[in-house]
Image (spheres, helix red, strand yellow):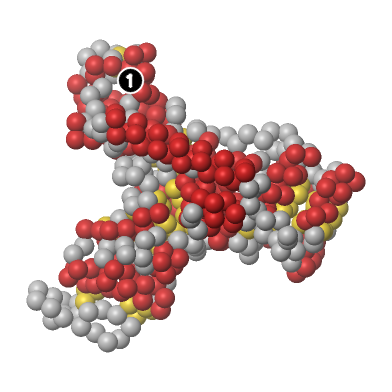
Amino acid sequence: MLLKNASILVIDDDIDVLTAVKLLLKKEVKEVITEKNPENIPSLLTSFQFDVILLDMNFKSAINTGNEGIFWLRKIKSMQPDACVIMITAYGGIDLAVRSLKVGASDFIVKPWHNEVLINSIQESVENKKDNKRAPMKVSVSSSENVMIGESEIMQQIFFKIKKVAPTNANILILGENGTGKDLIAKAIHQQSLRADQPYVKVDVGALSETLFESELFGHKKGAFTDAREDRQGRFESANKGTLFLDEIGNISLQQQAKLLSVLQNRQVTRLGNNTPVDIDIRLICATNVPMHELASESRFRKDLIYRINTVEIMVPPLRKRGEDILLIARHFCKLYCEKYLKPELDFDRRALDKLMQYHYPGNIRELQYTIERAVIMSEGNTLHADDLIFSPIEQQTAQEEEDELKLSAIEKNTILKVIDRNNGNISKAAKELGITRTALYRRLNKYDI
């Protein structure tokens, strides 16, 4: 009933999109107003009251921001802070669309969309207009140990992103330090995808030698090399119709990259010792702990392969940047291991909680998990104390190294902010003054979440 009484504004410079949305919604809502020119947004907001605004991310406009959707979203929110805005984006703009959530967007829809997805998003936005807070979410994958928990803003955005990209066939690149849960995100995407009932195959490609790489991924024919005693299907064929997860892809050689690129471009594999190509249909997810600015170096990684595997990028934050998620995760593991080792229910005292929050976790969630498991096993009584929490010495980093890194990052971020402000938001001029390319500046904007 709420949707039937809704007034919708659609802003897109593609006439075909405007026509399609109007035809779709005219029987679902009270009123649909379409607008091709975003410059008319202020006058429309002054003249009408809209329940939901559909806003495209990219326009052929004169606004020199590099992301017009964000600019107009800010404009809308400045005029009507409670406005409900759904962003419309293509695959390549998903990272930008996720950033728009921080500015105040309610949702984003990926082109081309399914009609029921668009209608459901508008329905939810209308119903939740008075409550802009999203409920805390978690992503579970197969077992109680394999669960991603988080109430922090940064994790809510990741969970939301998983929900949006999982039903698509977009290739995903997951970035983050070791132990942050990249493999859990990959499996969660598969389990929420349309391929969930098909195979999920994981390969640690960084651990494959040059000689094993082709045989493991593409398969081989009997007699193709020494010890090839039978025909063997490669991981690509094993994952056919399902999802292939290539972990630590940042560690493969340029020669391996060339072979992988050829398979992804042709959507075919040829087993070693055979000349007959086999068609493959996979959804590709890759992960690496190598930072994107290092990965983008041509001497280390082919840019054409980066574009091929990186339709959508998910950056997983280190545990030290997740605030009180640390305590949520610690309590989760505490409960899990109390049940596993038949211990009475345990809780943390104040000093133990403080110690958990103050530690820097170079080993991330994996280090916290093993720390809690060890503490539960060795515990006496019903309370875990600070002395029970012994962090692994193999993960230690010096405080001075971390402090120096933070200082350098802060200096770079502040310099970028000052130069952009001095150039009134003009990215080209700011990049020129900083002595770097626009692309390099955009990478830093993403790095520092500016």
- Identify the residue shown where x is 79% and y is 62%: 36
360 in relation to 426, above or below: above
| Amino acid tagged 1 | Lys
- Identify the residue shown where x is 75% and y is 39%: 78
In this view, the residue farthest toward the bottom is 275
Q: Nearer the viewer, residue 204 or 256?
A: 256
In the rendered view, does 13 fall on the left or right side of 429? right
Q: Nearer the viewer, residue 55 or 383?
A: 55
Pick the quarter of the image with the C terminus: top right
6 in relation to 301, above or below: above
Q: Where is residue 344? Give x, y as percent.
A: 29, 18
14 in relation to 2, above or below: below
Q: Residues within 10 Å of mark 1 (few under 14, many from 20)?
A: few
Q: How many marks?
A: 1
Camera sees residue 247: no
Q: Where is residue 327? Give x, y as percent.
A: 40, 26
- List the residue tagged with mark 1: 355
